[in-house]
Amino acid sequence: MTLQLVSRIAPQEYVSEVKAYDRLADALKARFIKRVLFLHGTKSMMKAAPFLPDLKEQGIDVVDVLFNGECSTKEIQRMIDLLKSEKLDAIIGLGGGKVLDTAKAAGYKAGTVPVILLPTMASNCAAWSNLSVLYKDNGECIGHQIYPQQTSLVLIDPRVILDSPINYFIAGVADTIAKWYESDLLLQQANRKSLALYFAREAARQCLEIPLHSAEKAIQDMRNGQLTDDWTQVMETNVMASGLVAGFGDEYGRATAAHAIHDALTIRPETHHLLHGIKVSYGIMVELIIEGKEDEMKRLLPFYRALHLPLCLADLSLSGISDGEIREIAEVATRPNSLIQMHPMNCTVDTVYDAIIGLEEWAKQNTVR
């Protein structure tokens, strides 16, 4: 299988350390940035504020903007309009994945202005990747867009992320392990020799091995408020290793079936309260059914139980849906523009429908409720 291979490996600069935010003012000055749009959520700003420098005292003008909640076309355009009307030099995004994705989209589309990201959670690789997952204003996922522009700077203060909601961290772990399963067949079947693909596969391997080995302890450390090596390693795996898979591997390292299932689940309002990575973790199990990898499912079962990840429709608040509604999810998952079209097994509506039904039976046989 020959896919596109354009490596967009990493942010231009990445710093993960206690007091990382202290570097912000100097980093802006080094980029000749004098006026910035500062996009953030309410809760994320409350967590980060004690550690942030006063940029105005450093001679940098700040236009403070509260995020509206969705990385949507409307919200992105609002940021673009502000960047242009206020003649701003850069955009800073502080918060979770949707805030960061909005900042990346607006920065690029406003004319490739520099993007600085300050993630306050480790729930996905949004701080690392050069793409945005796009949503309608009602929360329905409509796909993703990749940009040729890398993020200029990422600053992580581990203390801020340690103080973030644990359920977001767990969702990040779930989203991270998907990197291995979604890229596995693509990278195995690559018919080209490339060091970039080797690095992509090794990054994907760490996306599985580090969480399986250390995530449970890291989650407990987070509950105890302890900034340990295990927690730091898992946190950076969520952000860095998961971003490196597609960063090196491009289409060989992209999301496929598990994320396609996530996207399809977003048509059901009952699932909107569930975090991205939680729905993806269900998609992993559907993908493994499609690939006939029951041994791998059994390997993951204790991990899923420990992290309370979903194994059936009931776990997604979808216990009462009909066969027709399940088929509708399968239809959305296999649309022509769906990520599942990247999967090498040529998945059809029936493939996905049968896998969802098959997972229901497997879950009954392998879980105790």
Image (tube, rainbow, N blue to C red):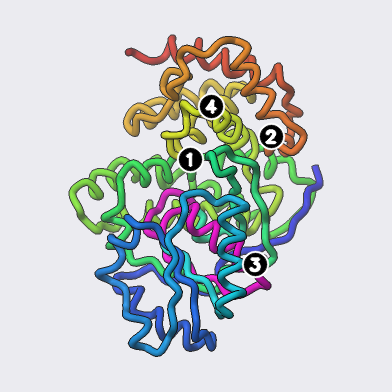
Q: CA distance from mark 2 to mark 4?
A: 19 Å
Circle 3 or circle 1, nearest the eye: 3
Foreground mark, 1 or 2? Answer: 1
Instruction: Specify which label sits upstream in the sequence, 3 or 1.
Output: 3
Q: Residue at position x 68%, y 39% from top?
A: 339
Mark 1: which secondary structure? helix
Q: Quadrant of residue 287?
A: top right
Judging by the rendered image, the residue that carries numbered circle 4 is: 268
* Of residues 32 and 43, the one drawn nearer to the viewer in this rendering: 43
Instruction: Say which element carries label 3.
Output: helix
Q: Nearer the viewer, mark 2 or mark 4?
A: 4
Q: Amino acid at mark 1?
A: His
Q: Which residue is mark 3?
A: 108
Disc 2: CA contacts within 10 A as few (<14), some (14-19) or many (>=20): many
Q: Residue 19: x and y, percent? A: 30, 74
Amino acid type of the residue tagged 3 in the rendering = Tyr
* Vertical order, 147 against 175 (above or below): below
Q: The C terminus lies in which quarter of the figure?
A: top left
Q: Which of the marked residues, 1 or 4, is nearer the chain's N terminus?
A: 4
**For residue 194: magenta?**
no
Q: Which residue is mark 1?
A: 276
Q: Which mark is residue 340?
A: 2
